[in-house]
Image: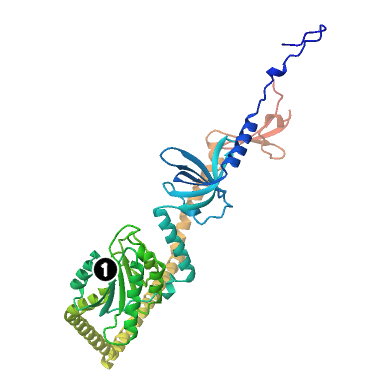
Amino acid sequence: MSKPATSQWDFGELFPPADTRKVLSVGELTADIKRLLESKVGTIWVSGEITNLRAQSSGHRYFTLKDAAAQLSCVLFRGTPTAQRELLADGQKVLLQGDVTVYEARGQYQLIVRAVELQGLGALQAAFEKLKQKLAAEGLFAAGRKRPLPRCVQRIGLVTSPTGAAIRDVLHVIQRRNPALEIILAPTRVQGDGAAAEIAGAIKLLNEWGAGGGAGVPDLILVTRGGGSLEDLWAFNEEIVARAIFESAIPVVSAVGHEIDFTIADFVADVRAATPSAAAEIITEGMFACREFVLEAPLRLRQLARRMLDRKMEGAAAGAARLGRLHPRRRLDESYQRLDDLQAGLLRTLKHAARTREVVLENLAGRFLRAQPSHRLPPRREALRQLEKRLHALGPEQVLARGYSITTDGATGKVLRDAADVAPGQKLQTRLAKGRVLSRAEPAA
């Protein structure tokens, strides 16, 4: 019940003690849950399948771990040391160790991963990559140490199962391409427990046989088996097999599985073949090529003999042509011909010079004829006559004859052209076509 008011400004106790509540913010509630999870659950191991893997540019990896019933958000920070970081992938089954906590910004609980262990095929793949990196660092895969195979192989050591498909494929190809090839079989198991030790022991046995220096030393060793799963091929991924191949004094060819299968043995071997059949073809290639060469030798010899004969005949013809060009008679004939050419050229030059002189003389003669007075006077006389006619036509007599007259000052003889120049009483003289008239000027009315 509220406290009674004692004045108009006393409203009493608005929130009695019985009605007060503790109100948390979202951040405070989330922090409490985080502390509770970290203290009650803490570090755990959990298994599941990875999904929604996301690798950030910062180096952190975010993913979801799920099973048939639930899912869990996980984060693997860049600074967390784990050897399996690069092998994480969607669908990968893993066993994780980490700390359960809450990502407060989203109010989401998650696992901060501290350790990763791959399960199933992922574990085998991780072991494969780890051994591959180790052996590569030691130089077992170096290209510089790999040896070329003999060209003509006469004898091989075969390390494989005597009942598998691989030996049948190898024998089939060898029978077809080089039936004379000798095979020393070192039978082994090619999968299961103890198979790797048997394969390594067979390789060492063939090397010891070769070290004895006796007859039947193999030219190379073929380690092979047919295709299968990663588990089936695992014997060829064991370190003991890799080191046996590396230490072999005899070149080793590895042909394990199919084209897409790669094993540690393939990387260490001197030559890797995609399949057992391909390995048999590589081994017999030199002898097969030699056999083909021998079969084709008669035809090639005939072709070579024909080519050589043709070259000799061409050389003889060329020599005869050179001798013909160098014969003294031919050189003398060429000298005669050059002399005739020079003589003909000289005559042409002389005729051309004489003709040029004749033309010059003819031009001079024509110019002399045109320059004679007898040739030049008639045109000049005619020109004078024409000028005379023009002067006569333009003379004052002809103007006067047409009815005109010329008036001049009677005293000075100056021709008068303007009446304003005439003074009253001035003596004038007018010339007519026939005769002259004297007069005196009178003022105009």
Check disc 1 and report the residue beneath it.
161
Which residue is nearer to you in this view: 127 or 259? 127
Disc 1, SS? loop
**Residue lying at 35% horizontally and 68% vertically, measured from the top left:** 196
Give the residue at the far right of this rendering.
7
Residue 128 as seen in the image, left or right of residue 303: right
Quadrant of the image containing the N terminus: top right
**Residue lying at 40% horizontally and 53% vertically, measured from the top left:** 120
Q: How many marks?
A: 1
Q: Position of residue 206 (x, y in %)?
A: 32, 78
How would you rate the neighbour count of disc 1 (Cα within 10 Å): few for under 14, some for 14-19, many for 20 or more? many
Say above or below: 249 vs 378. below
Which residue is nearer to you in this view: 84 or 391? 84
Q: Position of residue 357 (x, y in %)?
A: 40, 75
Give the residue at the far bottom of this rendering.
328
Q: Position of residue 242 (x, y in %)?
A: 40, 70
Do we see residue 56 in this rendering?
A: no
Do we see residue 74 in this rendering?
A: yes
| Quadrant of the image occupied by residue 192 | bottom left
**Residue lying at 44% horizontally and 67% vertically, measured from the top left:** 367
Residue 168 as seen in the image, left or right of residue 252: left
Q: Which colour scheme appears in the figure?
A: rainbow
| Quadrant of the image occupied by residue 322 | bottom left
The amino acid at mark 1 is: Ser
| Quadrant of the image occupied by residue 328 | bottom left
Which residue is nearer to you in this view: 100 or 39? 39
Quadrant of the image containing the C terminus: top right
Give the residue at the far top of this rendering.
8
Say above or below: 11 vs 187. above
Residue 19 as seen in the image, left or right of residue 339: right
